[in-house]
Image (cartoon, rainbow, N blue to C red):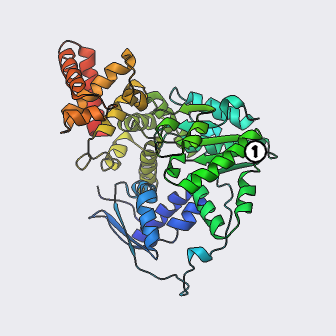
Amino acid sequence: MESTFDLSEKEKWNLVLQKIKADSMPAIYSTWIKPLRFISADEQNKEIRLTTNSTLSIGILRNRYMPIIKQAVLEVYGFDMEIIVSQGYEPENGGESEKQSDLPYQFEENALNPRYNFDTFVVGSNNELAYAACRAVAKGPASVNSNPLFIYGNSGLGKTHLMNAIGHYVQQNDPARRVLYLSSETFTNELVNALQSHEMDRFREKYRNIDILMIDDIQFIEKKESTQTELFHTFNTLYETNRQIVFTSDRPPKDISTIDQRLKSRFEWGLSVDIQPPDFETRVAILKNKAEMEDIEVNDEMLEIFYFIAEKITTNIRELEGALNTVIAHANLTNKPLTRKMAGEVLKGVFNTKDRTVDIPLIKNTVCAYYNINVQDMDSSKRTKNLAHPRQIAMYLCRELTDTSLPKIGKNFGNRDHTTVIHACEKISKEIKTDEELKKDIEKLKSSIMDI
């Protein structure tokens, strides 16, 4: 899809940087994103070339922050672009760059996103327990029943939003309570810096003298033994003095495999709550809320746009909002009215399926979102009807829409035997011949999997 934005490529890249900055922690933006130098953008070949002065930065950008960059690029350009980062320039001041070990040890302050508060969080059946738990934590004091609070779910469903909301609430309503929010990566980086600078006393003073400690994406401390050990002792100090701890992860504690058992058990001491993909009505409400925050009138035409996007994107709120951002940006930059037809044209590239891989995780997530069940439950040994039938449908679709072997399909559904997959496929094939409602459900799921 050709871009109609009347902007230079450098101006578009600056818009990309603005979006990344707004959605990232300041420390992450200043350390990894800001130093990138824009070289060129080729919309015809769909690639952007950047350079940096550090091979370490290239690896970290590719492994951790490329999805953030690509999402911002998608919002600005309206289609996906390949991001090519190479090493190739000296520091702009012409001087020698400092070695990491020569840098002074610094503490990072709270980096709360001003847009993420309880008022802007849309509550639905998929997240109401997590929302209520976070409200209770914010009001305090720490309760043994919810300490620690462990929130888990797939990326882009609102976990970070809720943690930020806790921080904002405490700062506004009880500023005497000391609250600290950060990512697990920041915790690890500060620990490394403190060890190098021989300032572990300062590090421990910071983390063990606060009232609420919130660490995002705790799964990233897997295989980091020193980080796990220090977090274990920090946890004990805070817990024993009745101070609140909150973690988020992409999976429940029991599924974070390569982590110290002592630490894993502490994750499970309090309350674990999950966030599921939102249902259709909640997705529309999220888009409506987003439009109102942008001061856009929600008329019948806008509702048609919301319905269109909500039908296409079912499992990720960031992608949902990103699609709406793309439509709004296009309308603003081209002075065109917001219409359902225009949204369809703008998002044609976003929803293009030619290069899209249909795989087992996509099918499982789509089926779970459709039937409002947990992916982890689908993999479990539970055989209740509300789980068994969607599981069989997912297996059937994996067989229909992929070239995956029966044993591999079974392995991806909680290590089940291939005969279980055969039974599921035969059962669903037979049922759709006589059950018109099931047949419609299967067609909707196929359409959703192939057309997102």
Q: Where is residue 343? Give x, y as percent.
A: 37, 44
Q: In the depicted view, which residue is nearer to us: 393 or 370?
A: 393
**In the picture, residue 127 is in which quadrant?**
top right
Left or right of 340, for residue 357: left
Q: Badge 1: how crowded within 10 Å, few (<14), some, or many (20+)?
A: many
Residue type at mark 1 is Asp
| Direction top: furthest residue | 434
Q: In the depicted view, which residue is nearer to us: 113 or 430?
A: 430
Q: Where is residue 123? Give x, y as percent.
A: 56, 31
Q: In the depicted view, which residue is nearer to us: 135 or 15?
A: 135
Q: Is residue 89 above or below residue 342?
A: below
Quadrant occupied by the N terminus: bottom left
Q: Which residue is mark 1?
A: 211
Quadrant occupied by the C terminus: top left
Q: Where is residue 159? Give x, y as percent.
A: 55, 41
**In the picture, residue 202 is in which quadrant?**
bottom right
Residue 335 in sight here: no
SS at mark 1 in the image: loop
Residue 4 in sight here: yes
